[in-house]
Amino acid sequence: MGPARCPQLQQRPGWGWMVQLYAARSAASWGMGDYADLGTLARWGGELGADLLLVNPLHAATPVLPQVDSPYYPSSRRFRSPLYLRVEQPPEFAALPPAERERIAALAEQARAAGGGDRIDRDAVFRAKTAALERLAAVDAGDQRRAAFAAWRDREGRGVVDFGIFCALAERHGVPWQDWPPALRHPDAPAVAAARDELAADRVAFHVWLQWLCDGQLADAQAATGAGMAVGIVHDLAVGVDPGGADAWALQDDLALGVTVGAPPDGFNQKGQDWRLPPLLPARLPATGYAPFRDMLRSVLRSAGGIRVDHVMGLWRLWWVPAGRSAAEGTYVRYPADALLGVLALEAERAGALVVGEDLGTVAAGVRETMAERGVLSSRVLYFERVDDDPQQPRLPAADYPELALTSITTHDLPTAAGWWADEDVRVQTELDLYGSATTPQAEAARKAGERADMLELLGSEGLLPDGEPDDEALVVAMHAFLARTPSLLVATGLGDALGDRRQPNMPGTTDEYPNWRLPLARSGPAGAEPVPLDEVLGDARVRRIAAALSNRTRSAP
């Protein structure tokens, strides 16, 4: 029998930061934030009194061009992205001759130059880091280093080798794997074993070695939280994987590759959503001992203080969309929730990790109650919370927020705090013509005006507004002070919210129309967004003001 509940690491009201790691680029990183920057954020957060650092999914992408920008559309959820590696950190770099280190420094400058403006350029980072890491992989760092790698690879077993094989084959044949020569389309095929042993042995070893480096650098980042953080780094678990990627190839017998998952039509997406992710087959899970789910959790929970399960309702049911059909033509398929929650609790107990469930959107009756019974924190967003969960009712007072929750102002798919007050979401959606036939820009602007008015009423009723006419910064601070008043076990805010950035990381319903997942940390001003390097963020007066507001939780929470 496994544990009945997930661990509760937090015994008092606490707070933390949410960050899109790629956006938090420092002077030392190569055009996007990396694992060393994650360690810097962890140390800094602990010094400010934060208890957690929630980071976007760091799952692996397929190592081909173009690189996928969305962290929620990974090639694999079991393995990590080498794109976040700090190249200069492994001992192999120090063992390079000076001339080789200079060549790598030149590659770093190329990556920084390409991604140094107001966009993250993953392709430039990928090209530069791949070239540099190939040079490091050729270095002999000594017997002890080779033995440590061999021991790690043996512990990881077949899974990491299959991942390395997929990466090597993808480099040769491209993606999706469904377009590969037929003899290579299944990991158990004899031709795949031959490719591993004869055609791509060096590349397989290279990609396995990269996963070893990722493992070590993530462990260093979690260790950087020290004793200051009660939880530490919380890793986000995406809902699914690219059907043409590594996990879909290696686990194809466990997936329903003829369908994808999404969400039914609702008030926010009248046509429904198709996330283009193949679901696990519920009937196969018991037969495999829940191995695909268990192994994925173990990977994400390694060197972690917690896990956030995106669309946690998927443990109960998923909206399946048949190939060739619209999202509105899908149907719910049920999953063995009790067993999946048991596996989740067991793996969280083994890792000593907190569990947060992202339960926003259409939530079936009983889901939140069961989450509370199992010790899974609910996700609550200030924009949405109303009395009795009724959109026609007033906004929920701070004292009435649930205790077993991670509460925030917003999420990566919603306007930032400053953007919400400035109607940036209405402006962008109007400019990109994203409103459907059910509404108009004028109607949305009127609706938003009503939301702003009742938010002002809420903040005023809590005594959080300054005298006179508050400016946008004062309103954002008041929102954070409201979070601090809730009894929720944890509250969190984004670094972009603290900086005053008006741009949201992702605009649902867009692909190339909006720079989703490519925006660095920035301040918004009269001239637009001004990118801010992580080195400056750490000392920013506005960021520290927000941190101070949230640090008052123990005093102000009911």
Image: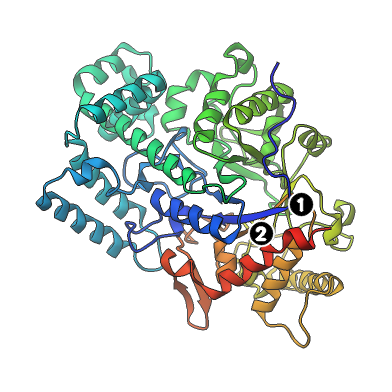
Disc 1 residue type (three-letter): Ser
Confirm whether residue 502 shows in the render: no
Q: Position of residue 43 (x, y in %)?
A: 49, 54
Q: Residues within 10 Å of mark 1 (few under 14, many from 20)?
A: many
Residue at 79% in and 63% down: 556
Residue 488 is marked as 1
Disc 2 residue type (three-letter): Thr
- When asked about the image quadrant of residue 465, the answer is bottom right
Q: Residues within 10 Å of mark 2 (few under 14, many from 20)?
A: many
Residue at 80% in and 33% down: 373
Question: With respect to residue 170, does 150 lie above or below?
Answer: above
Residue at 36% in and 25% down: 152
Question: With respect to residue 91, does 389 lie above or below?
Answer: below
Q: Position of residue 533 (x, y in %)?
A: 41, 67
**Precedes in sequence: disc 1 or disc 2:** 2
Residue at 31% in and 41% down: 64
Q: Secondary structure at mark 2?
A: loop
Q: Secondary structure at mark 1?
A: loop
Residue beneath label 2, please? 410
Q: Position of residue 168 (x, y in %)?
A: 28, 30
In space, the residues marked 1 and 2 are separated at their CA atoms by 15 Å
In the image, farthest residue toward the front: 227
In this rendered view, identify the residue nearer to me: 276 or 229.
Answer: 229
Q: Is residue 508 left or right of residue 359?
A: left
Question: With respect to residue 504, does 296 lie above or below?
Answer: above
Specify the quadrant that holds the N terminus.
Answer: top right
Specify the quadrant that holds the C terminus.
Answer: bottom right
